[in-house]
Image (cartoon, rainbow, N blue to C red):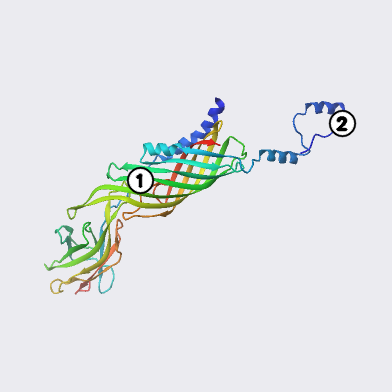
């Protein structure tokens, strides 16, 4: 940073000098460097906690969903190490097949978001990120007896406390905006890839807490109420 | 107020669009969700696939249910296995235009396994074949008989893939 050049004793310069406001720099390069330094945030720039409103709504009104909360750190406004945890729930019976699926189990995700916005001090943030997810859970599978029409018999299909374990990865894109004071709202859309799927005696679980419908890949979304701390 | 609504609009519009996209769903069940064992015919002389010139009927020995009803030109047939047992016996009835007929017996040992595909799909039983054997009749009775049988795929599921090879012996070399 440099101060204004020494004023000359000419009348025109005196007039120009009187119109100058704020800090001046010796060169555009120095001005840009000073601006960058001013925009730069400290390594530890805060943290936040959040809840996923979309997951809760899905849990209440659809066949499955998650009650989920998250905590994250803010490093220089760019990197946001994040830990997400919640309870995945499903208690649903298909109207046609009358198969009832029930589980209620915890899940965990660990990852990091990167803010790609040009100015990290902006009220809005644009995120790309990645997660590793894990859930170990029990589930019940209840269905009407399975008829064997060729032999005129039927077999019960009732399985309780089946064990499931899944590991997966996620890549995400998200936006968030400051709404008022420390309160933010944000959403993310996520592409999930299954790494490991433990099968039981009857096959794969239908819903995996924190992952969604069990498949080699799935899509998901969150809508978060965020509180900066 | 304007300064509050502006970022909210920008934030929520794509979120609502994404919410609408994720609200779509489809029926998660294979079109072919019937579990059937597939048996294919082969010539014992040439080891190549065989199409029967004579008529074939296949019945379940346990209850006489006809699975294949007097068909000609048969290369393979599909048959259901018992969910509640570990052995099925099939009666293969051959007949020809000369009025000759004979019955061979095919016995299949298997382990039923309950299978859940998804909530959209009825529960079913897959099977793991453990052994297969068959009886033969004299060629003088009917010049087409089972020579031998072998397992080619032990898993019986929704896939209609050959599970058992039935090698037939003839006097005419068909």
Location of the N terminus of chain A (image quadrant): top right
Q: Neighbour class for label 1 at 10 Å: few (<14), some, many (≥20)?
A: many
- The subunit letter for the residue under badge 2 reads A
Q: Is residue A11 above or below residue B141?
A: above
Front disc: 1 or 2: 1
Residue corresponding to mark 1: A103
Q: Is residue B30 visible?
A: no
| Of the image marks 1 and 2, the number of the one nearer the N terminus | 2
User: Taking A102 as reference, is A22 left or right?
Assistant: right
Residue under label 2, please give it: A8
Element carrying mark 2: loop
- Callout count: 2
| Residue shown at 72% from the left, 41% from the top | A33
Q: Secondary structure at mark 1?
A: strand
Q: Quadrant of the rendered structure where residue B167 is?
A: bottom left
Give the residue drawn at x 54%, y 39%: A48
Q: Position of residue B18 (x, y in %)?
A: 46, 39
Quarter residue B156 falls in: bottom left
Q: Residue at x 50, y 45 (%)?
A: A83
Tell me the residue at 55%/25% (across/down): B2
Give the Cα separation between the discs numbered 1 and 2: 81 Å
In the rendered image, the vertical position of residue B21 relative to residue B166, given as above or below: above
């Amino acid at each position: 940073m440099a101060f204004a050049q020494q004023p000359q004793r000419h009348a025109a310069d005196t007039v120009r000098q009187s119109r100058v406001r704020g800090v001046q720099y010796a060169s555009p390069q120095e001005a840009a460097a000073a601006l960058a330094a001013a925009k730069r945030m400290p390594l530890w720039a805060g943290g936040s906690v959040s809840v996923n409103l979309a997951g809760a709504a899905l849990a209440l009104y659809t066949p499955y969903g998650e009650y989920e909360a998250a905590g994250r750190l803010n490093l220089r406004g760019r990197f946001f190490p994040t830990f997400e945890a919640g309870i995945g729930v499903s208690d649903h019976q298909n109207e046609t097949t009358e198969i009832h699926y029930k589980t209620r189990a915890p899940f965990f995700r660990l990852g990091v978001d990167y803010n790609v916005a040009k100015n990290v001090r902006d009220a809005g943030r644009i995120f790309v990120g990645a997660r590793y997810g894990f859930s170990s859970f029990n589930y019940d599978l209840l269905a009407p007896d399975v008829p064997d029409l060729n032999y005129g018999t039927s077999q019960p299909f009732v399985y309780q406390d089946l064990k499931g374990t899944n590991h997966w990865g996620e890549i995400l894109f998200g936006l968030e905006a400051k709404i008022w004071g420390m309160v933010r709202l944000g959403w993310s859309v996520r592409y999930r890839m299954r790494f490991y799927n433990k099968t039981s005696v009857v096959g794969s679980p239908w819903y995996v807490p924190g992952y969604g419908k069990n498949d080699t890949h799935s899509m998901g979304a969150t809508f978060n109420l965020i509180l900066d701390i | 107020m304007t300064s509050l609504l502006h970022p909210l609009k920008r934030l929520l519009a794509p979120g609502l669009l994404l919410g609408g996209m994720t609200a779509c769903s489809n029926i998660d069940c294979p079109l072919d969700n019937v579990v059937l064992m597939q048996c294919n015919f082969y010539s014992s002389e040439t080891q190549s696939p065989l199409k029967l010139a004579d008529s074939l009927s296949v019945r379940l020995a346990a209850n006489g249910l006809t699975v294949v009803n007097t068909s000609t030109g048969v290369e393979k047939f599909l048959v259901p296995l018992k969910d509640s047992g570990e052995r099925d016996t099939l009666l293969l009835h051959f007949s020809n235009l000369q009025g000759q007929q004979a019955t061979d017996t095919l016995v299949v040992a298997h382990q039923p396994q309950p299978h859940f595909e998804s909530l959209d799909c009825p529960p079913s039983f897959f099977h793991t074949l453990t052994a297969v054997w068959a009886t033969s009749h004299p060629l003088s009775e009917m010049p087409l008989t089972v020579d031998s049988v072998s397992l080619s795929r032990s898993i019986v599921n929704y896939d209609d893939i050959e599970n058992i090879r039935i090698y037939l012996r003839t006097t005419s070399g068909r």
